[in-house]
Amino acid sequence: MTPPPPQGPADLVVTGCTALTHDPQGEIVFVEDATIVVRDGTIASVTAGGPKAPPGAVHVDGRGTVALPGLVNCHTHTPMVALRGLAEDLPAHAWFNDWIWPVESNLTDRVVGLGARLACAEMIRAGVTTFADHYFAMDEVAAATAESGLRAVLGQAYFSTQGPEGRAASLDFALRQRGAADGRITTCLAPHAPYTVDDADLAATAELAGEHGLLVHIHAAENREQTANSLARHGRTPIEVLERAGLLDTDVLLAHVTGLDPARDLPVLRRAAERSGGRVAVASAPRGYLKFGWDTTPVRALREAGVPVGLATDGAASNNTLDVWESMTLTALVQKSVERDPTWLTARQALDHATLQSARAVGLGEEIGSLTEGRQADIVLVDITGPHTQPVHDLAATLVHSARSGDVRTTIVAGRVLMRDRELLTLDVPSVVGELSGLLPELVDRSHGKRIQEYEG
């Protein structure tokens, strides 16, 4: 249940905007000339007209903008911005085995921290206020999250080849960092994937998740090849492997799922959603699938099965950007193409997936994802006065198909302004880029011939 809004003087007031809200049935409603009042980092009210900013409160003039709940990047690897554009126009096995996993053998904590800071800056400027990350040296990512002011769901990735220490380190990180950054950090367990984590580790992870009340964030059925290989080796699809291990009885976020076997997997996921009340969710990153020539996430079928689908970018090494706005637009377009149905996915449905569905996918559906009293004041203001967004006949269509991430003017998390009028307030990007650039030659050296893992699909 959403907590009641706090009482007392306002900390921040946004006036004169059009606010994207959700009605009790979850449908999108636009409130014209809205005033959003924030107290103690929480939304106290969203009203038409409303009071002027009182003395002492931060005032943000929202005229000419639409206020949206901050976007959620439901699956990414923030430090991989350091590898942006390194390996292009390759099939997945060559991308992993010849480039990414050899280079990741060279990762240092400092590279991870700098990459995460650069990624946080990119996301703030693109209207992302929460991200779910699944990578290595995650204490560095937690520090970058705290410094940036963003909200995050963080997990320390592990492979079974690391032995029991890998799973133990993932749990240790989750317990130590849970609630860090003034409560903006939520943690999870992060086994890499069914093809790199064995059945025993998956089952143990399910037990730990239940014992400690942790989300599990895992890659699953990333493409058809992985599903075919899993059937050949185990007689089960990746989704069925996770079911057997007990992971579908926990809170679980499945990344990608483009290789879903509809006949076998949809009944499994439907049963899991019915048992758990929708705790099984999927993160979809359509740009990367287009680059790899994969199928896309079957959003319609998953939604009909009761599985929330959130939007994501994956890492910038494959996706090239951390632009969830682009993911929203591509989701709307690609779904129309694969379904051969121009009525699906609508602009309003795309906005729903980018906001409330994404919040539910990362386990924060009662805290963020909607401009509603009692929820966290994670708000972005999008400028719609530019020539490419005028005139406005259908505001939802304008936001999805005409606006872009560069139109985000202001980004607010927990009532704190992280970017105002396109000025980033929490991170020094030139300093980060300068130091990271000096570390790149050593990072991308593959002459050692090592890999952190072997991609077999």
Image: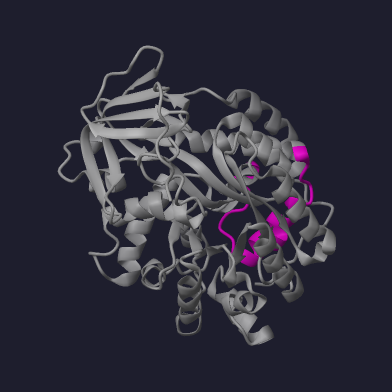
Residue 451 visible within the image = no
Viewer-closest of 117 and 92? 117
Image quadrant of residue 100?
A: bottom right
User: Which residue is at a point 59% across and 79% down the rendered structure image?
Assistant: 240
Q: Horizontal placement of 263 versus 90: left or right?
A: left
The image position of residue 312, as x and y in percent, is 49, 53
- How many marks do you count on the picture? 0
**Magenta extent:** 82-109
What x and y, as percent, mark residue 44? 37, 33
- Compared to residue 143, the image places residue 430 above or below, namely above
Residue 51 drawn in magenta = no
| Vertical relation: 159 (above or below) 398 | below
Q: Position of residue 440 (x, y in %)?
A: 72, 38
Q: Is residue 201 above or below residue 240?
A: above
What residue is drawn where x is 54% and y is 36%?
Answer: 150
Which residue occupies the extreme top position in the image? Answer: 55
Of residue 446 and residue 259, the one placed in the foreground of this image is: 259
Instruction: Looking at the picture, tell me which residue is in the foreground, 263 or 45.
Output: 45
